[in-house]
Image: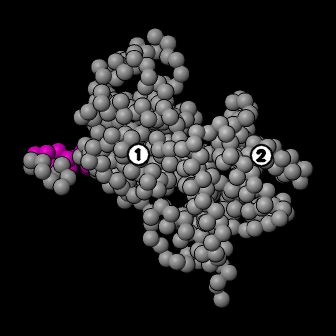
Amino acid sequence: MTPSDTGSPSDQEALRTQQAFATVVLRQYWGFSDFRPAQREVINSVLEKRDTLGLLPTGGGKSICFQVPGIVFGGVTLVISPLISLMHDQVVGLTMRGIPAFSMTGRVEPAVFGHVLTRMKGGPFFLYLAPERLKSRQLRRLIQQSSVRLIAVDEAHCISSWGHDFRTAYRAIFELRNALPDVPMCAVTATATPRTRRDIVQSLKMKAARTIQSSFDRPNIHFSITHQMDARPRVLSHLESTPGPAILYDSTRQGVEVWTEKLTRAGISVRAYHGGMDQEERERNQRAWMQKKVRVMVATNAFGMGIDRADVRLVLHVGLPASLEAYYQEAGRAGRDGRPALAEIIVTPDAQLARLALLQDGTIRKLRVRRSRRLFGYMRRYVDRPLCRRWGLLGYFSELSPQQCGNCDICARQLP
Ligand SMILES: [Zn+2]
């Protein structure tokens, strides 16, 4: 039974009014006529003040799931987000729509703090926080004094060590739950296996949580896997036959450097992105690619979270991704505009060796290594199995789909 089933007639009436108001908010601030089905379900559940986990694919409008209820509730919505760029984009998006929002990432000056405090007394107001900020006693006091009506956790898979972007500081979010026991929590993510989902719900100490999942299928992406001795000719031929923006993922920093040089020598405009570069250079390269000044981004898995570019036609993996979750998230950056796009893994003997070497890294804790090996095991089985790729990917996320999708390399081979 949902709280609305048990609520009094006047509670139910209030809930219906809020639901209608949510649609008005969407029209007025975003200009869309209606929610997508999964968005509406998540929003209705949050409006019922239930802890809710929303699983929506990349480009599925995840942020609306907590932004709209935040406006309906009034007061303060706390948003925990893992990336400065992601927070920045959302704060700008809200501000442009005339909705007050602010992000706190590093140290905050007392004057700014005072300003935020004043804003928090009114509403609605969106305060974006890096999870590390929750350690600040001053901030915790501020939060407890203000009228917080909703806690949102963006990219919630970061809380699970089974997920692919694990961030230790995310584990501290549950303390918010202790400080604000009656405030509903809304967590959203684009990819999460059943195990990661359970982990999110438990780690956030969500109460009677509802999980709402929209289909993960991305029908316009053609999935493909090829085994090659040398990846270079294959990469070049794809770049020639598929015009438009592209991302090339390699598992190591060194691999990224090598590919950047190879492609540059082949006369292709390209930039690199990996964790070993200094932040300024990384941001410069990302901007150049986002602003369409270069065509190809060559990157490790450090690149991509929060990347909002809809017209990517090609995502190539020349190194094996660490897990199917990571792979689906990276491949899912292709074709977000809904037009045909291609995602291919090019398996070479070198690629397999590079990933195995990463797994033997002595600096990682034992438990982490065991989990990583297991996750990589699924990846290898996926790569070696001659079965419909989409069926394999969706099955990994416990989604049933036909055994022949008609839009992957295996299905293409079987067509008459
Ligand atoms: Zn298929």
Residue reaching furthest to the top: 110
Q: Mark 2 or mark 1, which is nearer to you?
A: 1
> Residue 180, can we see it?
yes
Where is residue 190? Give x, y as percent.
49, 52
Against 114, is 343 above or below?
Answer: below
- Report the amino acid beneath label 2: Val
The residue pinned by badge 1 equals 200
The residue pinned by badge 2 equals 256
Where is residue 152? Give x, y as percent.
39, 38
Q: Earlier in the sequence, mark 2 or mark 1?
A: 1
Residue found 77% across the figure and 61% down from its top: 348
Against 187, is 396 above or below?
Answer: below
Residue 12 is a magenta residue: yes
Q: Dominant secondary structure of the magenta stretch?
A: helix
Q: Quadrant of the N terminus?
A: bottom left
Stretch of the chain drawn in magenta = 10-21
Give the side of residue 335 with respect to residue 37, left or right.
right
- Report the amino acid beneath label 1: Ile
Where is residue 82? Give x, y as percent.
52, 36
Q: Quadrant of residue 241?
A: bottom right
Pointer 1 local density, CA inside 10 Å: few below 14, some 14–19, many at least 20: many
Q: Nearer the viewer, residue 307 or 248?
A: 248
Q: Quadrant of residue 156?
A: top left
- Queried on whether the Cβ of the residue with tag 2 lies below 8 angstroms from ligand 1, the answer reads no
Under circle 2, the secondary element is helix
